[in-house]
Image (cartoon, rainbow, N blue to C red):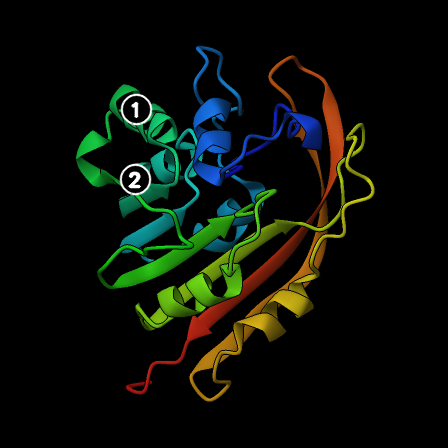
């Protein structure tokens, strides 16, 4: 899925392959780097002060977030639908000297989810032109979050400046929160808001972005 600061846009609907796997494999098939390699701004804002643990990076793309987390002591399971994307993540982790902290797994979240317990589940721009039960997948993974752990969901809240997708309706953080249907007795909503940022593309140009940010923390019965 799209991940880390964007350097491009999705292909037009006419160019969209028949399946999600084909779409994302094609997306990461070329030699050119798609994203900047920098971690997502909201991830940095929300995770910097958290104690390192086991993180699940959904839609890891080229590994910008996974590498940043691993460099700060996290053990990361990086997941993507595209094997090409996972290969890029592995290469990025190796270049950064954190390969031992990053494990990649291929999952089509419409069909399977990774096993294990996680202190952080991060879904940054887990958005795709193909329909799937994203809320259901995130709900299942939220059940695997440890007591005191965090779910972070960052979405495009609007098409970025210069995009051709201004007709696309993006979910608000509040709508995403409602769709998750998490038990409020077990979860505390830390942030549900929209944030504006300026992103720099690989060619040096900038765009204005509106991100939807949802942060949830699993209540710890031990206090």
Q: Residue at x 49, y 36 (%)?
A: 39
The reply to whether callout 1 and callout 2 are in contact (CB within 8 Å) is yes
Of pointers 1 and 2, the one earlier in the residue sequence: 2
Q: Residue at x 35, y 34 (%)?
A: 67
Image quadrant in which you'd find residue 7: top right
Q: Residue at x 28, y 45 (%)?
A: 76
Q: Secondary structure at mark 1?
A: helix
Residue that extends furthest to the left in the rendered view of this protein: 100
Left or right, 165 with respect to 17, comes to: right
As drawn, 98 above or below 1: above
Q: Which mark is residue 96?
A: 1
Front-most of residues 142 and 206: 142
Q: Which mark is residue 165?
A: none
Which quarter shows the C terminus? bottom left
Q: Residue at x 38, y 33 (%)?
A: 82
Front-most of residues 204 and 12: 12
Q: Secondary structure at mark 2?
A: helix
List x then y, in percent, for residue 97.
Answer: 24, 25
Left or right, 73 with respect to 198, comes to: left
To which residue does mark 2 refer? Answer: 70
List x then y, in percent, for residue 59.
Answer: 44, 43
- Spatial CA distance of label 1 from label 2 is 9 Å
Mark 2: few/some/many CA within 10 Å (<14, 14-19, 20+): many
As drawn, 179 above or below 36: below
Residue 12 visible (yes or no): no
As drawn, 162 above or below 140: above
Mark 1: few/some/many CA within 10 Å (<14, 14-19, 20+): few
């Amino acid at each position: 899925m799209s991940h880390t600061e964007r350097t491009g846009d999705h292909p037009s609907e006419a160019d969209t392959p028949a399946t999600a796997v084909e779409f994302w494999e094609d997306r990461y098939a070329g030699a050119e780097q798609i994203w900047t390699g920098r971690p997502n701004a909201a991830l940095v804002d929300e995770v910097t002060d958290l104690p390192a643990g086991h993180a699940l990076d959904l839609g890891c793309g080229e590994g910008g977030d996974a590498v940043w987390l691993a460099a700060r002591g996290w053990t990361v399971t990086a997941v993507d639908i595209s094997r090409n994307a996972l290969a890029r993540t592995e290469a990025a982790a190796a270049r950064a000297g954190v390969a031992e902290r990053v494990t990649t797994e291929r999952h089509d979240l419409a069909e399977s989810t990774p096993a294990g317990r996680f202190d952080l589940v991060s879904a940054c721009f887990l958005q795709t032109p193909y329909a799937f039960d994203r809320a259901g997948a995130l709900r299942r993974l939220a059940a695997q979050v440890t007591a005191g752990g965090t779910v972070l969901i960052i979405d495009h809240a609007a098409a970025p400046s210069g995009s051709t997708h201004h007709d696309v309706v993006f979910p608000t953080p509040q709508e995403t929160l409602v769709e998750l249907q998490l038990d409020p007795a077990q979860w505390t909503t830390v942030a549900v808001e929209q944030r504006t940022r300026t992103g720099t593309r690989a060619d040096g140009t900038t765009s204005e972005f509106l991100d939807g940010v949802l942060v949830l923390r699993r209540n710890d019965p031990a206090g």
